[in-house]
Image: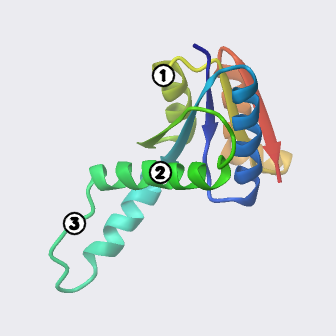
């Protein structure tokens, strides 16, 4: 069975991307995997912020971050894929976005990746790297990019 991976972010372009990925996957009888990656920096910021709250008895664990990422992908998928006849599953990961996108695509046997591109100047790409370009170059399959 064919599988496609759609990378979920908190942006309006992600909704259009997921809808398009779902419709294309449904058209070819493929499954759709929805992935949200919480970066290490985001995880640490949230954990540190919660630790600063006085009298808070619980801590923010990696397991909670993974479940939160998975739930974010699931909620968006439920909203956007309503009425699209496609089987989909939601996955959450923590780490470097590029590495986690490529690892998830490989681990789950995905042959197509859909992701939202970020508009950056050539200087910005040189200084900060470009996740989209890196995935395109390193993924052994088709990559569809939607930009805002």
The quarter of the displayed image where residue 102 is located: top right
Query: Where does the image place residue 27, in percent across and percent down from the top left?
Result: 76, 25
Between 106 and 52, which is closer to the camera in this rendering?
Answer: 106
Which structural element holds mark 2? strand
Query: Where does the image place residue 84, in percent across and percent down from the top left?
Result: 69, 40
- Marker disc for residue 108: 1
> Coloured how?
rainbow
Q: Quadrant of the N terminus?
A: top right
Look at discs 1 and 3 and give the one toward the viewer: 1
Q: Quadrant of the C terminus?
A: bottom right
Q: Going 50% across and 49% down the picture, which residue do you hit?
A: 74
Between 126 and 109, which is closer to the camera in this rendering?
Answer: 109
Dot 2 or dot 3: first in sequence order is: 2
Residue 19 vs 104, above or below: the answer is below
- Marker disc for residue 38: 2
- Alpha carbon distance from label 2 to label 3: 17 Å
Q: Which residue is mark 3?
A: 59
Dot 1 or dot 3: first in sequence order is: 3
- Alpha carbon distance from label 1 to label 2: 19 Å
């Amino acid at each position: 069975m064919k599988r496609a991976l759609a990378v979920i972010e908190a942006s309006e372009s992600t909704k259009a991307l997921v809808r398009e990925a779902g419709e294309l996957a449904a058209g070819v009888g493929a499954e759709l995997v929805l992935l949200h990656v919480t970066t290490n920096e985001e995880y640490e910021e949230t954990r540190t912020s919660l630790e600063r709250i006085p009298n808070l008895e619980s801590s923010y664990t990696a397991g909670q971050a993974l479940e939160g990422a998975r739930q974010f992908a699931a909620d968006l998928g439920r909203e956007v894929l309503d009425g699209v006849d496609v089987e989909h599953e939601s996955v959450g990961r923590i780490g470097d976005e590029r590495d986690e996108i490529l690892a998830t695509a490989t681990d789950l046997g995905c042959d197509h990746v859909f992701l939202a591109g970020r508009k950056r100047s050539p200087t910005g790409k040189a200084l900060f790297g470009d996740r989209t370009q890196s995935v395109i170059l390193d993924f052994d399959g088709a990559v569809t990019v939607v930009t805002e």
